[in-house]
Image (spheres, helix red, strand yellow):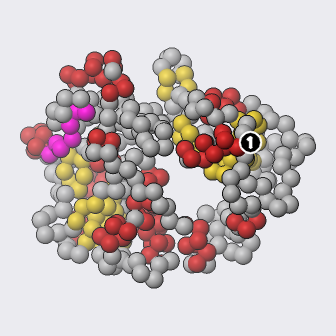
């Protein structure tokens, strides 16, 4: 397998593009003298572009063959496309190429049944929870364990109980990534959830602040047409000069679940001390169907600035039929993205005919 052999090569780096809590219980361990393993230490996948843009990361990748891996291969493809865009748009940053593990870790472990260069378990998002090399002994698996219970620090490599890190980030939001709690500490974790902290928060790790100008890179590469159409995504990119500069009382809110309601949004923002005056669901111009974004006009400029500074707003969990609170991603928090949305020079908003609805439109255009 080409990927397996590449890990033996010098001048090679291998990047785990999964979240840090996934990497904690298992990762590739290249042989001595081979590839260098890099961990982006991501709380969410949104941290990856900032990590990749950081000068220290670029220095490690410069003129190296870059390997990437993830659970099933999808995140690797996105990360590879991002890296290729960044190197093609730069005159100074370049690599010797990118190699992905086809089929992800799952396929690798089916090919190398005793583990190959894999160490530990592969974190899974289904009922299996994790995957181990099928022909690796239990003794060898126990020897691979590097992760610890977040309470007693005993070596442990299972996520049970849906416990989350309660540490507050500089943004004011809770970290909320899953943490490991051993069987002996389950009752303690349930009685004192506010004391739980993940490895990244224990070491006070913070994601780099600066993000790459991805739109600017695409324009440089000719991937955005004159009318603003993105040739990669098919979406239309709005020119910055068409909008006013500076703060705006109107915010763009993105990555909204399709099942959200206006009350849900107001409750989530209100929990952080900011209030929404009106909500305008953004819909497809052809079908009039909601696709996960909205304009929210805040009650004051101060509220708009506070929400903008946070960048992400956590949606409150919904109540299931079994009366247990959860969200659509199980144990993972759902965040909506927030950014200023100033009016264009000739834009009239909201239109007189607009009426706010509790539920996003399902699509009613003829």
Total labels drawn: 1
Residue sitting farthest toward the right = 352
Residue 363 or 159: which is nearer the viewer?
Answer: 159
65, 316: nearer the viewer: 316
Name which residue lies at 29% across and 48% down.
23
- Measured as percent of width and height from the top left, residue 147 is found at 21, 41
Q: Quadrant of the N terminus?
A: bottom left
Q: What stretch is highlighted in magenta?
A: 144-150
Label 1 crowd (10 A; few <14 / some 14-19 / many >=20)? many
Residue 45 position, x and y percent, is 44, 51
Residue that label 1 marks: 297
Residue 189, quarter of the rendered image: top left
Q: Please check the rendered image and state whether residue 148 is part of the magenta-colored stretch, yes or no.
A: yes
Residue placed farthest to the front in the image? 302
Place of residue 13 in the rendered image (x, y in percent of width and height, measured from the top left): 27, 68
Confirm whether residue 194 shows in the render.
yes
The foreground one among 21 and 76 is 21
Looking at the image, residue 2 lies above or below residue 48: below
Whether 40 is drawn above or below 171: the answer is: below
Secondary structure under the numbered disc 1 in the rendered image: strand
Q: Residue at x 41, y 81 (%)?
A: 92
Q: Say whether residue 320 is magenta.
A: no
Q: Residue at x 72, y 39 (%)?
A: 300
Question: Quarter of the image holding residue 356?
Answer: top right
* Closer-to-camera residue (16/241): 241
Left or right, 191 with reference to 169: left
Task: Name the residue: 10% across, 43% down.
Answer: 143
Left or right of 214, for residue 116 = left
Furthest residue toward left: 139
Q: Is the magenta stretch mostly helix, strand or loop?
A: loop
What is the x, y in percent for residue 26? 24, 47
């Amino acid at each position: 397998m080409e990927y397996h052999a590449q890990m033996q090569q010098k001048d090679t780096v291998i990047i785990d593009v999964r979240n840090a809590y996934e990497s904690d219980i298992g990762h590739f361990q290249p042989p001595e003298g081979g590839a260098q393993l890099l961990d982006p230490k991501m709380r969410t996948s949104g941290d990856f572009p900032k990590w990749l843009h950081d000068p220290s990361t670029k220095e490690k990748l410069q003129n190296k063959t870059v390997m990437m891996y993830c659970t099933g291969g999808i995140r690797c493809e996105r990360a590879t496309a991002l890296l290729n865009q960044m190197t093609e748009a730069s005159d100074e940053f370049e690599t010797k190429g990118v190699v992905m593990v086809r089929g992800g870790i799952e396929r690798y472990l089916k090919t190398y049944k005793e583990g190959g260069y894999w160490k530990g378990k592969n974190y899974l998002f289904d009922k299996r929870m994790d995957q181990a090399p099928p022909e690796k002994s239990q003794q060898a698996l126990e020897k691979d364990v590097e992760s610890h219970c977040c309470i007693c620090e005993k070596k442990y490599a299972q996520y049970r109980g849906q416990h989350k890190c309660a540490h507050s980030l500089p943004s004011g939001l809770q970290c909320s990534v899953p943490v490991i709690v051993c069987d002996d500490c389950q009752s303690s974790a349930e009685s004192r959830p506010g004391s739980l902290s993940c490895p990244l928060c224990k070491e006070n790790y913070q994601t780099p602040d600066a993000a790459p100008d991805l739109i600017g890179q695409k324009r440089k590469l000719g991937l955005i047409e004159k009318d603003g159409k993105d040739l990669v995504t098919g979406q239309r990119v709005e020119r910055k000069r068409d909008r006013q500069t500076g703060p705006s009382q109107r915010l763009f809110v993105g990555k909204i679940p399709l099942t959200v309601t206006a009350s849900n949004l107001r409750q989530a923002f209100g929990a952080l001390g900011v209030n929404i005056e009106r909500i305008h669901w953004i819909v497809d111009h052809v079908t009039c169907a909601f696709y996960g974004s909205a304009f929210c006009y805040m009650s004051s400029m101060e509220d708009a600035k506070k929400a903008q500074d946070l960048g992400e707003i956590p949606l409150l969990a919904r109540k299931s039929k079994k009366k247990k609170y959860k969200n659509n991603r199980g144990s993972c928090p759902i965040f909506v993205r927030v950014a200023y949305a100033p009016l264009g020079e000739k834009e009239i908003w909201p239109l007189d005919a607009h009426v706010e609805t509790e539920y996003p439109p399902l699509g009613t255009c003829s």
